[in-house]
Amino acid sequence: MGKVKLKRGEEKRIKAGHLWIFNNEIDKILDLKENGEIVEVLDHKGNFVAKGYYNKHSLISVRILTSDLNQDIDKNFLKEKMTKAYQYRQNIYPRLSSYRVVYSEGDLLPGLIVDKYENFLSLQILTLGMEKLKIFILEVLEELFQPEGVVLKNDSVFREMEGLKKEITIVKGNFDAHQIIEEYGLKFYVDLLKGQKTGFFFDQRENRGLTASVSKNRKVLDCFCYTGGFALVAAKGGAKEVLGVDESESAVKLAQENAKLNNFNKVTFQKQEVFNFLRKLNSAGEKFDMVILDPPAFVKSKEKLKEGIKGYKEINLQAMKLLNSGGILISCSCSYQFSKEDFLNMIKKAATDSGKKFRLIKELTQAADHPILLSMPETQYLKGVILEVL
């Protein structure tokens, strides 16, 4: 087994529970036979710290799997971790059958995402180390779920950063038809092959529920609506009119199908470039009682932070200008490089520039099936607010 020896003091963060070792924290590599293999991590004196997998091509050189010297990283290890993860979801969502089963570092399995859509599973293997464990992963999932279908949705850009190919592979089952899942008494078609990420955004589940509670009798605009999650929940909550907009034609078509599936005739969807559309609405003097902003990640690297914050501020400013007195803004960011503090500061500056007074009703984060590792702030990527115009 290869060994990764750290520079003096670099083991402290790992011993405190962080799961990443960066390439500039490493002193030397010993006895490495194959890139992506399991390695022992040693402090500068040669004492054992942890085991993880190593990738010489990645900025994050080692991702930690265990701090137990005697723990083998094998099928039994994966089965224990994944069973524990599944039991946790069954406890928090006893009446649900669609959710995230494995959330990477949040379940101490860095590089692995598993989402359950009724009897179908959609996986993302994001790292070389997890790719080498793929056969074990698929065997464990078969034993735990006996799923009707399994797809490897390995089309994330993160795979390229690990030296892996982007690809989508059907492992088992027939994916010709869209799957149907339920949330808050609504049904949603999900495209597990062509949809964004694994097909649906489970991380916003609780936030969609909050949206329903404040949408009654409101005229609602849902921006970056994807397949209509927020829009349809707002309609169910009693919104008098809902307009959803998204730049993806396929997402808009599926959102329209989801509206029909739930017999909503007061919900419409349009293909629009959101920034320009918001400016046009303001120029036309349009007003709404609720605006929802759930954009894609504008900040995908630290180098893009300043540019991304500018984009977030502009879109929030335009949304704020559209609101009536007493109106509600639900605004989110899924960029983990964009800190909660920076996000709230951006919201405050946009509010000031809008010339309106807002009060904070609630801060938002990701759903409970995306658990946050306290020792690893990077696992909390989703932040948001519910604001009210005074």
Image (cartoon, rainbow, N blue to C red):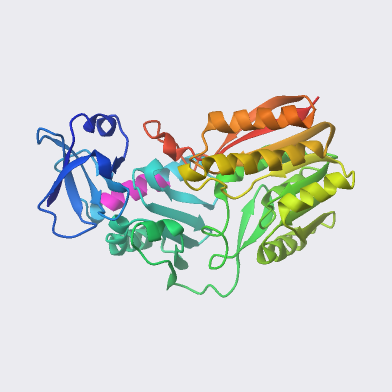
Residue 321 lies, in percent from the top left, at 80, 37
Q: Nearer the viewer, residue 172 or 58?
A: 58
Rendered view: 5 above or below 144:
above
Residue 346 in view = yes
Magenta stretch containing residue 83, yes or no?
A: yes
Rendered view: 123 above or below 167:
above
Residue 165 lies, in percent from the top left, at 38, 67
Identity of the residue drawn at 60% across and 72% down: 177
Magenta stretch containing residue 68, yes or no?
A: no
Residue 281 lies, in percent from the top left, at 84, 48
Identity of the residue drawn at 18% across and 31% down: 8
Residue 213 in view = no
Quadrant in the picture for residue 331: top right
- In the drawing, does residue 165 fall left or right of residue 93? left
Majority secondary structure of the magenta segment? helix
Residue 333 lies, in percent from the top left, at 59, 41
Rendered view: 135 above or below 374:
below
- In the drawing, does residue 307 fall left or right of residue 369? right
Identity of the residue drawn at 25% across and 31% down: 15
| Span shown in magenta | 77-86
Rendered view: 230 above or below 168:
above
- In the drawing, does residue 156 fall left or right of residue 194? left
Q: Nearer the viewer, residue 269 or 210?
A: 269
Identity of the residue drawn at 46% across and 63% down: 155
